[in-house]
Amino acid sequence: MEYRKLGKTNLSVSEIGFGGEWLERHEKSESVELLNYAHSLGINIVDCWMPDPKSRDIIGEAISRDREGWIVQGHIGSTYQDGQYVRTRDMNFVKPAFEDLLSRLKTDYIDLGMIHYIDSVEEWDRAMNGEYIEYVHDLHKKGVIKHIGLSTHNPRIGKLAVETGFIEMILFSINPAFDMRPATEDLDSMFEGYDNESFSGIDPERAELYRLCEENNVGITVMKGFFGGRLFDKERSPFGVAFTPAQCIHYSLTRPGVSSILCGYDTKDQVDAAVAYETASPDERDYASVIASAPLHSYEGQCTYCGHCKPCPVNIDIAMVNKLYDLATTQKQVPESVMEHYRALSHNASECIGCRTCETRCPFNVKIADRMKATSELFS
């Protein structure tokens, strides 16, 4: 298992994580065993947004065997009322629900205290003004939550979170289909009435969010990386083609700022399929060829950092150079953090010999040699 630093938290999280929402489908002992199995393979981060007692008890029993070895995303504002999940900022429910989380998880701290599920500006304003956010800050001050995070599906809210300065990481929905759709306050309506014309490359607001996270060292953990399994089914995939788990995982992990993708599991076989990413070949990870051959896409001329351009005869990491170029060109001046990453490269764009061999391998016909020249000039 490979591990990555989660933004400014400096926590080292497994690239492949555990999204816990399916645990309650099974017998408690079976789900506890599943979590322990995932942990034995190196998975060390688990998300618990679920307020129901069964899910929390399962996670609590599993992590109690190695509490320090688990990084827990625990949500503040996810409550259980009359046997139903309710998202709320009402402190009459928020505080008891969080205290219940601590009790059922058998712990006195949560690694990542998540401001739970904000997708609208109205909800953002409600959460950021008053007792709710005061409670979050108080938990952080007391060390009950070690770091403050936020979960959202809306890149506009993600941007607001980055700009606060105190939110250290976000849980965000990322997959190839979501990235091609504009921001919405209603995730369920995202793919209503879409067509080829509106399905046009990475949405600028999403690209901007990834850039801001990378630049400000705000880590990203990924939810909905498989689009609820729709991307595995040609008939249900918005692209009209099917992806594999390894391809979806690789797509998420190549986005700027991303540290871990939290997958949902029902079985050990599904855990194995996700963890197999770590030993997958470049061909097995290749999402770009799938997108390029899809009847519904428009990534033409856009670098997706897929790595098809390898190998370079002078050993330039072309995908990384392109990523740093994209991060830098939206600013009036190159951010110092991006400049430092560029300086740290073993080989940079100035070494490009203009052979254009890489361009023959690019699924999206990116003019790579031209970008190398522009990058060299930008960073010089």
Image (spheres, rainbow, N blue to C red):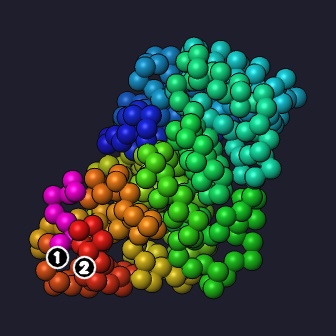
Q: Quadrant of residue 322?
A: bottom left
> Does 69 appear in magenta?
no
On the question of residue 68 being in view, the answer is yes
Residue stretch rendered in magenta on the structure = 343-350
- Indicate which disc, 1 or 2, sits on the residue closer to the N terminus: 1
Residue, disc 1: 352
Left or right: where does residue 376 sit relative to residue 85?
left
In the image, what residue occupies the spot 16% across and 63% down?
347
Give the camera-side residue of 262 and 26: 262
Check the image and report above or below for 158 versus 78: below
Secondary element at image label 1: loop
Q: Residue at x 43, y 53 (%)?
A: 215
Residue 23 visible in this rendered orientation of the protein: no
Image quadrant in which you'd find residue 37: top left
Residue highlighted by disc 2:
373
What is the chief secondary structure element of the magenta stretch? Answer: loop
Mark 2 secondary-structure assignment: helix
Contact, CB < 8 Å: mark 1 with mark 2? yes
Q: Quadrant of the N terminus?
A: top left
Q: Quadrant of the C terminus?
A: bottom left
Q: Amino acid at mark 1?
A: Cys
Q: Is residue 344 magenta?
A: yes
Rendered location of residue 327, percent (x, y): 41, 63
Viewer-nearest of discs 1 and 2:
2
Q: Residue at x 43, y 45 (%)?
A: 217
